[in-house]
Amino acid sequence: MKHLFTIFGNPVSHSKSPLMHNLTFQGLEHDATYIRYKLEDGRELRNKFFDLNIKGANITVPHKEAAFEACDELDAFAQKVGAVNTIVHKEGKLFGYNTDAPGFLKAISEFKNIKTVLFLGAGGTAKSTSVILKDAGYEVSILNRSAGRLAYFEEMGFDTYTFESFKEQTNTYDLIVNMTSAGLEDNELPCPLEILEKVMPHAQASVDVIYGKETPFLKFAKQHDKPTKDGSDMLLYQGVIASEYFCEGRYSFEEIKEHMQKAFTL
Ligand code: NDP
């Protein structure tokens, strides 16, 4: 029987995931199809899974915490960070994973000799990615516009700053990451220009999690002749890892990547 996969989110019309996964299924001759489902209420997610007999799903904004709640079983990392972006349905049970964070880790590990990392932003994506980086031996500091979201990171033992408290900071960072949505639908920098002027000259590289456009942040990094990456590799790698779960290990990372990356050339 053909297996059905979907992305749940709101909005989902812009998502590249259906294209990425359908190209992969087609290329690997895996008998499955991947659709998009605009879900208004995250509490409905579990019922939709069973009503539509969905084999697996990705979950995007704003339902990653609802997806965490919907699962019967969680892998250790998803359990630790409280956010699920991939669910697989097996024998009546929902198994939850977080592939955003390993996708980001793989994307940045292509820059060599990085030890210290500064995150601009403290939202949901910063939470899971900071934890996986810390576990992998990176020293991560978090700088956010407002203080409210920093409590989680303080509890987890990260150095945290607001724009105000960062004025006194004299540390340097090997990698600067835009983890905010500044630049996604506007032309804003993720922090005051003075802060970027202070940290960027000492950095070895710079990454934006936003993909498909050159944000003001990435433009600034390029003006400083830094190697840069947008969020496309993170998106690709989280998708490859999700597909490994969807196809239950039948194909290797490289086999899936070969097909999935075609979505970025269309
Ligand atoms: P959240 O809504 O959870 O957090 C948003 C963060 O951005 C907060 O820290 C917020 O600060 C900050 N922020 C928003 N606007 C501005 C601004 N104008 N200036 C400064 N700070 C700002 O978002 P997510 O963590 O879910 O997503 C963050 C980004 O990651 C998005 O751009 C999203 O598209 C991208 N993403 C990319 C993925 C990929 O595969 N490439 C995967 C997942 C996400 P404050 O606390 O002060 O409000």
Image (cartoon, grey):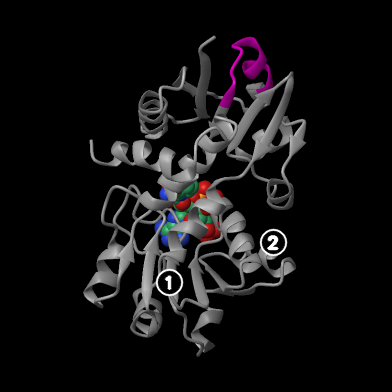
Residue nearer the viewer, 191 or 48: 48
Q: Which mark is residue 63?
A: none
Residue 229: percent from left, percent from top: 34, 61
Q: State the separation of the CA atoms marked 2 and 1.
A: 20 Å
Q: Which amino acid does label 2 sit on?
A: Tyr
Question: Does residue 114 appear in this view?
Answer: yes
Q: In which quarter of the image is the N terminus?
A: top right
- What segment is highlighted magenta in the picture? 46-56
Number of the front mark, 2 or 1: 1
- Quadrant of res 255: top left
Amino acid under label 1?
Answer: Ile
Helix, strand or loop under label 2:
helix
Residue underneath mark 1: 176
Residue 158, located in which quarter of the rendered image? Answer: bottom right
- Residue drawn where x is 55% and y is 29% of the image: 247
* Image: 251 above or below 222: above
- Earlier in the chain: of badge 2 and badge 1, it is 2
Q: Please rate how many residues cluster around mark 1, counting C-alpha atoms within 10 Å: few if below 14, some from 14 to 19, many from 20.
A: many
Please say if 263 is above or below 35: below
The residue sitting at 53% across, 48% down in the picture is 100
Quadrant for the C terminus, please: top left
Residue 69, percent from left and from top? 73, 35
Q: Give 153 or 205, whichever is nearer the viewer.
A: 205
Q: Choose top left, top right, bottom left or bottom right for residue 11.
A: top left
The x and y percentages for residue 124 are 58, 51
> Is 63 one of the magenta-colored residues?
no
Residue to which mark 2 is pinned: 152
Up-down: is 22 above or below 60?
Answer: above
Can you say whether 220 is above or below 6 in the image? below
Q: What element carries label 1?
A: strand
User: Which residue corresponds to the image point at 44% horizontal and 73% vertical from the top-left?
Assistant: 175
